[in-house]
Image (spheres, grey):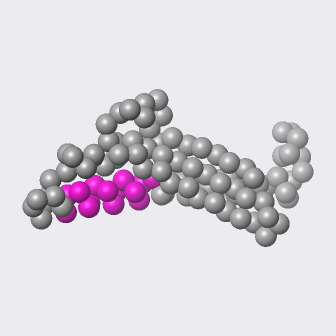
């Protein structure tokens, strides 16, 4: 299994405020080979204590922020997964790629 990790917020500590969003994409090929890519990011959406859910506007602002953050992480992870899949396909069709030539 090929596993790649990406961190959308490189250099940030896990102790930083904000909610950590993690996204994993797993591609299982017919031959059983699995390509798995994980991406995470901190601070895209605020901690629950900092969200005003007492008003409709506060709730909608939270939903909008969360949606944008989740879509951004999903898109980043999908891009990395498809790049990894393409690299694997290239290695299978071009044996010279396996030797780094």
Query: Left of 7 or right of it: where is 68?
Result: left
User: As drawn, which residue projects farthest toward the front?
Assistant: 49
Q: Position of residue 84 (x, y in %)?
A: 68, 52
User: As drawn, which residue projects farthest toward the left?
Assistant: 55
Compared with 44, 27 (above or below) is: below
Along the line of sight, the residue nearer the viewer: 1 or 81: 1
Residue at x-position 63% and y-position 60%: 26
Is residue 79 in view from this perspective?
no
Along the line of sight, the residue nearer the viewer: 97 or 14: 14
Res 54 → quadrant: bottom left
Q: How many labels does the image show?
A: 0
Query: Left of 17 or right of it: where is 24?
Result: right
The quadrant of the rendering that contains the C terminus is: top right
Looking at the magenta stretch, what is its main secondary structure? helix
Residue at x-position 86% and y-position 45%: 98
Res 34 → quadrant: bottom right
Q: What stretch is highlighted in magenta?
A: 60-73
Query: Left of 27 or right of it: where is 24?
Result: left
Residue at x-position 28% and y-position 55%: 65
Compared with 11, 47 (above or below) is: below
Q: Where is residue 46 in the image (x, y as percent from the top left)?
A: 27, 46
Is residue 53 in view from this perspective?
yes
Res 62 → quadrant: bottom left
Along the line of sight, the residue nearer the viewer: 25 or 94: 25
Q: Where is residue 92 in the image (x, y as percent from the top left)?
A: 85, 57
Compared with 100, 79 (above or below) is: below
The answer to if 55 sits in the magenta stretch is no
Residue at x-position 84% and y-position 39%: 100
């Amino acid at each position: 299994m090929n596993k790649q990790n990406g961190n959308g917020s490189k250099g940030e500590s896990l102790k930083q405020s904000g909610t950590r969003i993690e996204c994993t994409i797993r591609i299982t090929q017919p031959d059983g080979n699995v390509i798995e890519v994980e991406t995470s990011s901190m601070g895209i959406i605020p901690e629950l204590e900092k969200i005003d859910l007492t008003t409709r506007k506060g709730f909608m602002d939270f939903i909008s922020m969360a949606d944008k953050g989740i879509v951004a992480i999903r898109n980043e992870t999908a891009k990395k997964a498809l790049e990894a899949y393409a690299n694997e396909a290239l290695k299978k069709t071009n044996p010279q790629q396996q030797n780094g030539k």
